[in-house]
Image: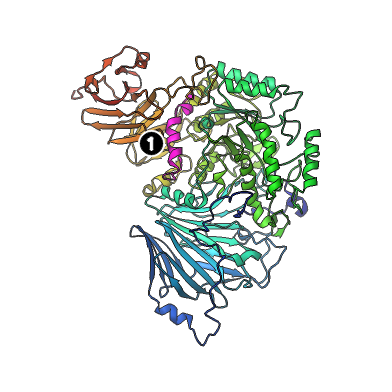
Amino acid sequence: MRNLLVLLAAILLGCGASDPVGHDTVIQDELPGDAAFDDGSSDTGDNGEEEPPDCIFDDPDVYDIEEVTQNQEPVSLIVGKSTLTIDGSAKTITFSHDSKSMTALDFEGLMIGVVSEYEDDLVYEPYLIITKHSMSQKPKGLRWLSIVGMKMQENDENSAKLILDYDELTVSAVIKAQAEGSFSIQMTPSDPDSKIAFFRVRPEVDSQERFYGLGAYLDQVEHRGTIRAMQFVVDFDMESGYNEAHVPVPFIISTNGWGLFVESPYPGAFDVAATEEDRVDAWFGTGVDSKDGLRFWLFAADHPLDLTKKYYDITGYPMLPAKWALGPWIWRDEIDNQTAVEEDLRTIRDLNLATSGYWIDRPFASGVNAFDFKPQDYPDPQAMINLAHDLGFRMALWQAPYLAGNKESSDETKALLAHAKEQGFFPDPVGVPLNGWGDIIDFTNPEAFVWWKSLIERYTNMGIEGFKLDYAEDVILGLFSSRTPWGFWDGSNERTMHSRMKLLYHRVYAETLPEDGGFLLCRSGTYGDQVNVSVIWPGDLDARMWDHREVVETNKGPIMAVGGLGPSIIYGLSLGPSGFPFYGADTGGYRHSPPDKETFMRWFQQTALSTVMQVGTSSNNVPWEFDPDNGDFDQQVLDTYREYASLHMRLFPYEWTYAQNLAVDGRAIQRPIGLAYPDLGVHPSDAYMFGDYLYVAPVVTKGAVEKQAYLPPGQWQNWWDGTVIEGAQSHVLPAPLDRLPLYLAQGGIVPMLRPTVVTTAPVLDPETIDSYATDPGILWVRVFPGQASTFTLYDQTAITQEADGNHINLSIGQGDEFKDGAVFQIFGLQQEPASVACNDVDAAKVADLDDLSGEDAAWFWSSDNGGVLYVRLKQGTAVVTKADMAD
């Protein structure tokens, strides 16, 4: 099931290295069918394909570039509030937005590395050079050149074409203002034989800036002071053997409101003010392909969270999961048979556990990948899938891009393998083999792509609507600095396909899903892949509360841990601003399973307040099985799990609204505090915002029953008991084992499904299984009254609240789905209100909460949790008059 990166380098080289080593990421424009994303050929530059300008330096007696540079007037490209100014005299390209300076590229900000000759067997890996790794091999004659002069060749209001003089060679730079806050710069050598091997983009930064994005990492969510490889990094100290960064994205976001996206598939690294505190230094090793140049983008926005939309405008907007795919999901690793699956499905419903999906992990097929079900274990898979659908589950299966010929093979896999070999559906040559099943399918071959898609449809035609896509990271650049050559049908090699393969693998499955999006859970990804991938999961995390790179003792001796719950939170928070807004780790972890009771409870509390709640471990312990030999789960685990799974399910209208808004504002759903509140100056990796209103501070330390946390400005209400604390300061938050520190912002509105909903998928018998798909029904809306605010749901239901002196004003309109109004919940009211009027008529007070289910306006007050008011409002406005608090 899992990605076991076979470290052949360690075998060949004796495992002598202790420093991390790198390898790459790539995307190319042409895939079978449409492009992976719009490469901007119509309006975003020509990516170096234009004819180079006539060389103006052929006769040095005719032209003095230094003199022209000094005498040039600055030229500004202006779009809306954004300005890019090219000043030859000052030797700078400056970027501003709304009259605020964002960053600048001086003449040392665009550097190139030249070599004496290209070496075909060499991996041009910047990360190895930056970190001075003992196994790195420096290219022959590598020298760094800075700009010494600049000539404006042509310009208009939206573009400029420069000639950059590096003394011994020249580079054209085409700058285009694409939209407000979005400028592209395409650098292309004037001489294709210039022996350029590296490009470096080095914007200036100040000491107060902090940085987010860059894909998925496990150590910290903010990057200042780090060096981030834009590809897998081998790490012999780590228990997995590599850095677990499966989703590198060359897009960095500054808290000052600007971003840099380097649109390059080649090996790269970001030195985030680590070597020089006033520079971000993005290196890319284009090697023998440097004649095509490098394109990068400068973005600016009013708020740093809005920069991700600028990135989406270039690379494509994310594929949303289907509504029902937002879970919770249950899965089993190596589940035995159809009977066991069907028993799980019935048990989940019997125990009233909110769940909308179930997937079967390997091995369920006769072999990897047979595209069948093992007949002796799954005698009637169609009946199993039909049962799942009847009970309100959607079904998914584990997949990998191989056809097993030896390990886990069968007659079916061998027949498919023979056909694929006969048709030439594999790369030639193949580099280092990294799994025991076989070679990866060459998806650059259109016939192989269509054939594999037809095999997938064997499952989708049965009603399978989702897949967990493992592996596809076989194509590596090489062993340290030396290539391990690959060859593909389209003429590409590992220099690009080490990353592009992920896109093709994910796309072939994405094209088989239903129109509403389905469910793809993918281990890997790269820039632009968000158009194919609906959910990322981080691979094999530890089923413990260990930190990333923490040295821990195990029964096999000391190890350097990949990390568990805390690193999982960081991984998801890194991905959201980087363009992958949906993330779900294995709740409970994977390595060293089973998790103990505390780890599991803390983990499911956190995933309940995340975009995707998928629950399963490698030891197959599930919340309802109390096996002392497989964890220490008990009735408290099950009861608490039921509560949090229900909360996750009920938060669907809140989350789905933010999901739909990705196309409007691009803002991540799970948001790092330091990015959501850049002026606050705090950058925790263990707390975050879930949407605009919910502050989540999971417990990640074993044995802790309190949580030290710094809350954003304003007042915050404890979700569970209604107590209020003041933000913009640090607090010790109560966190007993069964409680996640969760706070609602004043003025916050959180729409939820009714408490009885257990699935968002259709069901056969709606009388026994309550499903949102049967009837969206009445909303339950949690409110912390404050300054006037409005929450408009994805179906255009508009909800408002306002605390006005001794009154609380509430309103709800009728949307396309939610037509039955709402039950408003207000915690911490302390005293029963004097009155509640709905649409100017006094509403009836009822004696029991269940009495609010009717059509009439009504209200109920409970003294629990500091006093809770419930107001039933079909449509229109409600005015709550609070009791006289004078005494």
Q: Is residue 204 visible?
A: no
Q: Position of residue 766 (x, y in %)?
A: 50, 17
Camera-nearest residue between 279 and 249: 249
Direction from residue 726 to residue 437 in the image, left or right: right
Direction from residue 695 to residue 861 in the image, left or right: left
Q: Position of residue 101 (x, y in %)?
A: 37, 61
Direction from residue 284 to residue 302 in the image, left or right: left
**Residue 595 placement: quadrant:** top right
Neighbour tally class for label 1: few under 14, some 14-19, many 20 plus, Cα within 10 Å: some
- Residue 747 among those drawn in magenta: no
Instruction: Give the residues in magenta.
Output: 646-669
Camera-nearest residue between 870 and 357: 357
Residue appearing at x 64%, y 53% in the figure: 20
Name the main secondary structure of what is drawn in magenta: helix
Quarter of the image with the N terminus in it: top right
Direction from residue 265 to residue 299 in the image, left or right: left
Q: Is residue 791 visible?
A: yes
Residue 265, above or below 636: below
- Residue 647 among those drawn in magenta: yes
The amino acid type found where label 1 is placed reads Tyr
Camera-nearest residue between 867 and 429: 429
Q: Position of residue 317 (x, y in %)?
A: 50, 46
**Residue 168 placement: quadrant:** bottom right
Residue to which mark 1 is pinned: 693
Residue 550, above or below 885: below
Quarter of the image with the C terminus in it: top left
Camera-nearest residue between 446 and 778: 446
Circle 1 sits in a helix, a strand or a loop, which is it? Answer: loop
For this orientation, the residue located farthest to the top is: 847
